[in-house]
Amino acid sequence: MAKLTKRAEDYSKWYNELVVKAGLAENSAVRGCMVIKPYGFSIWEKMRDELDKQFKATGHQNAYFPIFIPKSFFEKEADHVEGFAKEAAVVTHYRLKAKPDGKGLMVDPDAKLEEEYIVRPTSETIIWNTYKNWIQSYRDLPLLINQWANVVRWEMRTRLFLRTAEFLWQEGHTAHATKQEAVEEAEKMLQIYKNFAENFLSIPVHTGVKSESERFAGADNTYAIEALMQDGKALQAGTSHFLGQNFAKAFDVKFLNQDGKQELVWATSWGVSTRLIGALIMSHSDDYGLVLPPKVAPIHVVIVPIYKTDDQLEAIRQKITPMMQELLNKGITVKFDDDQKQKPGWKFAEYELKGVPVRLAIGQRDLDNNTVEVARRDTLDKKSYSFENISAQIEALLDDIQQNIYNKALKFREENTYKVDNWDEFVDVIENKGGFVLAHWDGTSETEALIQEKTRATIRIIPDNAPEEDGKCIVTGKPSKRRVLFAKAY
């Protein structure tokens, strides 16, 4: 099995190799699009199922809206159309016909659409056009809808999972009677994303609001979770938007309040995507392959038998079958790999590459001693365990692995977060160290743009837990009341 490029040699190459060799995804015949392979899709399914459960527990329901959005809908909200115009894929015709020479196909010029359609880059416009029919009275509010879908944003530079022309995501779209309710909704969903990232994916994240220039197109405020990858770059892992009444105004969505008066509805939208798989890879994995937190791993435990004869294999199978059933009863997925086409050494490397959290190896000597060799993927440590109460020991070990992976990522983030007080320090950290930089900013878009132009670093968020402190902007020297979080980012 060919080894991966080491992260220290070429991080980007390591990432691309790992995605392909671990069987997560590959580039497709369609420019900028990917094929998500079964192992990668099973990780997405785990994420999707957990988030779906949390959404429904907070009162949200799933629905589905068209992938085609009339171009006129986008034109109704000026900031929104400007924000997505450069990435829009447009459908202009609905039929093909044979070329005059009979060789191949061409667009039928007589099949031009009366109105062009945008292939869904996000669904605010089509959904708010629909909500106009659903919302008449305060009794119809709040309206809490989520959809699982694919979207298309015609990216010029793509990378598997991180930035592709088509990707999978969920997008929540809610309608409320008051501004306070909508703000509370946006903040609540951000906390759901934070808890999911930290407790399910073991990725520590910062929460806060985006600067005005980084807001979602059409939002009054954008909240985000930001994670730090192992190469020192930030990754926006999820966003939640307070949309104010912008889309209600654009689509004339009003409700009759309890006093019998017409009011515009208040709105939010929020989403995470398959980009989270990229975040998962770059937060935890190593030079041997994936490192997956157990909660998101498609396979929790793999058992590799070591044997010379069919009788030995059968004895091993009989020994481990009750344990496998106990693990399955605990919700722990387990694979017994008795494939005779590959040797145990190849299997060990393969399951390390795929990030299976726990690997058991058992041979004749283990049978004689009533033991089993247990290897944990996060530390690569191996240890002999007694077979007595082994399923409970593995269950505890998986919990420990989940926490250890988080602790390691948190330690990395803490060691790569810097406070700076002047421009020279800022440039030194951004250019030579990477990571998160906490610095004072004067609050102007001009200064923000200048910093990005000179260093390619952006304001990731204005942290919601940043303490008030008197300081001076690292560029202009103007007064500042709190530090903001800078980084180079994906």
Image (cartoon, grey):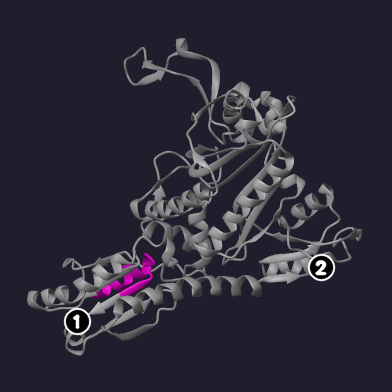
Q: Nearer the viewer, residue 368 or 478?
A: 368
Earlier residue among tags 2 and 1: 1
Residue 350 belongs to magenta span: yes
- Asked whether the beta carbons under mark 2 and mark 1 sit within 8 Å of each other, the answer is no
Span shown in magenta? 344-359
Quarter residue 98 falls in: top left
The residue that mark 2 highlights is 424
Q: On the rendered image, what quadrant is the N terminus found in? A: bottom left
Element under disc 2: helix
- In the image, residue 414 sits, relative to residue 387, either above or below, namely above
Kind of residue indicated by mark 2: Asp
Element under disc 1: loop
Would residue 365 be found to the left or right of residue 154 on screen? left
Q: Residue 363 carries which label?
A: 1
Would residue 379 be found to the left or right of residue 171 on screen? left
Q: Please identify the dominant SS of the magenta region.
A: helix
Label 1 neighbourhood size at 10 Å, few (<14), some (14-19), many (20+)? Answer: some
Q: On the rendered image, what quadrant is the C terminus found in? A: bottom right
Q: Which of 186 and 410 is in front in this view?
A: 186
Q: Residue 193, position in %: x, y? A: 57, 55
Q: Residue at x 62, y 66 (%)?
A: 232
